[in-house]
Image: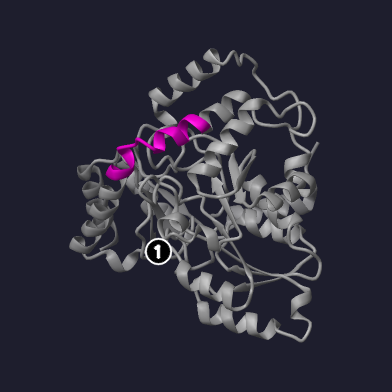
Amino acid sequence: MKIPKALQQKILFRKDSNALRNLPLPTSGIDFSSNDYLGFAKNEEIFDTTHQYLVENNIKINGATGSRLLSGNHNLYETTEKYIAAFHQTEAALIFNSGYDANVGFFSAVPQRNDVILYDELCHASIRDGIQMSHAKSYKFQHNDYEDLEMKIAKLQTPNSELHTIYIVTESVFSMDGDTPNMETLVQLSEKFKALLVVDEAHALGVFGEKGEGVIQSQQLQDKVFARIMTFGKGLGCHGAAILGNTDLIEYLVNFARSFIYTTGLSPHSVATILVAYQNLNQSVALHKLKENITFFNQQKQLLGIKPLFVYSKSAIHSAILPGNDKVKKIASQLQEKGFEVKAILSPTVPEGQERLRFCLHSYTTESEMKNVLDELSTLIL
């Protein structure tokens, strides 16, 4: 049975604009594309420790058996959520099945009909999708533009402003740019206008802070942020996410976040992997190595004279802007032929004219690999 004509036309449009997405097969190239910043996804010690933990605690089931509100709330959830809350210096944590589920659950449930959401224009699709499901009004502000944000908040101030809540939404590391907003300025604005600050820390966990706690804790701002979303599929190398906040917020989410209520829970093995990965953050030498690699990569960009191509970043994500789907796909293919697994990010994933090569750095990346890939890039573009 054929798909409807309207769907066929949309696929044809993607093909004509050289923007059609395809599922890639695994490759053996040097990894500059995965989000496994600390190498935890391939860490055999974490794998073995997780298995040992389950056996020692006589947890020998493969699935959660149901939603957490029915039969799926196994004891390991409580243990892990308490550990996460203590690690992140917050009152409570609630685990979701993915970062997407966490953002959709939060933004569709927490902001109310008379509330207002102001979100950075480059916020992740999961945040945007959750906001679309909300009954609150929403407006985007220009990327990391605090004057634009303040101007928009000021316009919302009315004699009845106290009747609604303003939510300021951003990411601590933006997934396509790798840059970080000025969190202190955002905190000051949220306090000035009595707004609630919500921060997605998906790409900061395992990268920033003495133990990989994220940007917010590294700046000692955890008590000034209403909610943080921590995603485990990046720096922790596993799966799932958690929303951090006070106990009242967590209780509310358990009762009203539909992506939490109406889904089967994570398996005990998945939750145990999260717990063991967090425990490894406390003793990880990989974090220190990753930070060294980020510094080295930035230095090499400067030495080769290609720094202006890149969005400023001190994270594990470094994006070289090369406008045009055809151009960036061609250069990515040439790098891949040389053995470097570098991905092209195309429009409409990023705005037209902002197409890019996205380099992800890891604790296991060698200096020679970083130098060689940048040497090759400079040859291809000059």
Q: Secondary structure at mark 1?
A: strand
In this rendering, is residue 118 above or below 339? below
| In the displayed structure image, the side of residue 232 where residue 65 appears, left or right | right
Let me know if residue 173 appears in the view.
no
Q: Residue at x 55, y 44 (%)?
A: 85
Residue 259 image offset from top left, x and y in percent: 73, 44
Q: Is residue 276 magenta?
A: yes
**Residue found 52% across the figure and 70% down from its top:** 187
User: Toward the viewer: 299 or 279?
Assistant: 279
According to the image, label 1 marks what residue?
321
- Above or below for 47 versus 123: above
Is there any visible trace of residue 192 in the rendered image?
yes
| Left or right: 109 as drawn, with respect to 47 | right
Quadrant, the C terminus: bottom left
Label 1 is placed on what type of residue? Ile
Q: Nearer the viewer, residue 157 or 355?
A: 157
User: Toward which corner of the image does residue 242 lie, by quadrant?
Assistant: top right
Which residue is located at x 50 percent, y 47 percent? 88
In the image, residue 73 lies at what x, y percent? Answer: 71, 29
Q: For the magenta stretch, what is the residue range?
A: 275-289
Could you tell whether 237 is left or right of 54 in the image?
A: left
